[in-house]
Image (spheres, rainbow, N blue to C red):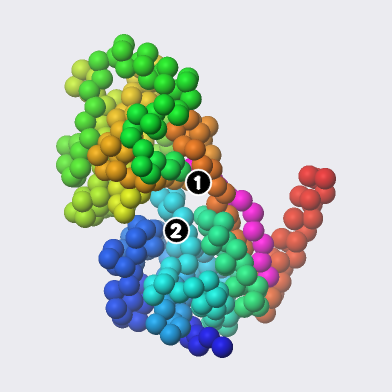
Amino acid sequence: MLWVKGELLTEIDAPGVDPTGQLDRSGQTSLFDRRDWFRRVWRHGGGMPLIARAASEGALGWLFLNREKAGRATSLANWYSFAFRPVFSGNPDPARQRAMMTAIAKRLRAAKPRIATITLSPVPENDAELLLGAFRKGGWTTSAQQGSTSWTANVSGMSFDDYWSARPGQLRSTFKRKAGKAECETQILTAFDEAAWAEYEEVYAESWKPEEGAPAFLRELAIAESEAGCFRLGLCRIDGIAVAAQFWTVENGRALIHKLAHRETAKELSPGTILSAAMFRHAIDIDRVDTIDFGTGDDAYKADWMDSRAALWTIEAFNPATLAGLGGATKSRLSGLVRRQRDG
C-alpha cells in the first residue's frame, strides 16, 4: 500500500508549500507549473489561495486553487494560462500520482468551511483523466466537457525551410506576395527593452484584439522571462512604425506564443504573417526548439502554422456532502442528458 499524506495551505508563500524548492524554475520545466506563476496569477487576480499538497515517499504533488465565495473553488489560472494541471516532483509513477491526487481530493472534500463545487480549467486530456479518477475516488461527483483547444507544432530536428515547405500553399503564397510589396523590417529582441515594449503595447491597443486583461501581469512576466534568458519580442515596422508585434518565451526546447497583434490600419499588408515567419525561423533555426505552442483557442489561422490540435477540458467536481454540491451534480447530469438527446 502506498503511504500518502495530504494537507491544505492558504498562503502561496507558506513554508510548507515548497520547503525544498521543487516549484522553482530548476525543479519544473513548464512555466505554468511554477510557484512564481501561481503567485503572479493570484497577485493580479485576487481571491484566496488554497493549495492542496500531498507527499508520498519522496514524491510531492500539488493542486493550486482559488477559493471563492459561496463554497466554490476554481483552478488558480487566468486567460494567460496555457494549461492547468497537477504539479509533481520526485518523478512519481502513475500509480503514485493517482494516490496523491486522491488524497488531495479527499482532503478537499473534508475542508472547512465546506467546498461545494470545484471547477478546473484549462486541463489537458491526460491530466483530465487523472483528476477525474482521483476526485471520483475521493468522493466527489464529476463532469467534464471540452472548454478550449491547444495547437502545437512539432519541429524537432527540422530547419525552418523544412517546416515552411509543409505549410499550406496559400500561406506561403501570401507571405511571398506581401513580403515583396511591403517594405517591412523585422526585429527580434531577446532581452526586455522599455521602448520596444511600449511599441508592442501601442500595436496591441490598435489591433483587433480586446482590451488587454492584465497588462501589468504581462509586463511582469516579460521582465522575469528576460532575466531568465527566455524572452523573445518580435516587431515588424513599416517606415519606422511598428505595425505588428509578438511576445514569445523559449525554454527547455519549447516556444510559447503568448501574444500577437497587428494594427488594423496595416491589415492589408499582412505584417502579422511576415513577422510570424521571422519568429518561427528564429525559434527553429536559432533557438532550436522541438515544439512551438500557440496557446489556447481554436482560431482558424492557427491551423496554417500548427500541425497538432488537442482538447483542453473543463472539469467540475461536486461535493455530495453539501446541498449546493448535490444540486450542482443534479443540474450537471440533467444538462448532460439534454445534450445527449439533442446530439442524438
> Where is 164 relative to 147, above or below?
above
Location of residue 339 in the rendering, given as x and y in whole percent from the top left corner: 76, 50
In the rendered image, which residue does mark 2 sit on? 77
Q: Residue furthest top?
A: 181
Question: Is 173 positioned to the left or the right of 97 in the image?
Answer: left
Judge by depth and name the residue closer to the eye, 213 or 195.
195
In the rendered image, which residue does mark 1 sit on? 150
Location of residue 30 in the rendering, given as x and y in whole percent from the top left corner: 37, 58
| Element assignment for label 2 | loop
Asked if the magenta segment contains residue 148, the reply would be yes
Residue at image coords 25%, 31%: 235
Label ID, residue 58: none
Question: Is 164 positioned to the left or the right of 185 in the image?
Answer: right
Location of residue 58 in the rendering, given as x and y in whole percent from the top left corner: 39, 82
Look at the image and give the residue range highlighted in magenta: 141-151
Separation (CA) of disc 1 from disc 2: 16 Å
Dominant secondary structure of the residues highlighted in magenta in the image: strand
| Element assignment for label 1 | strand
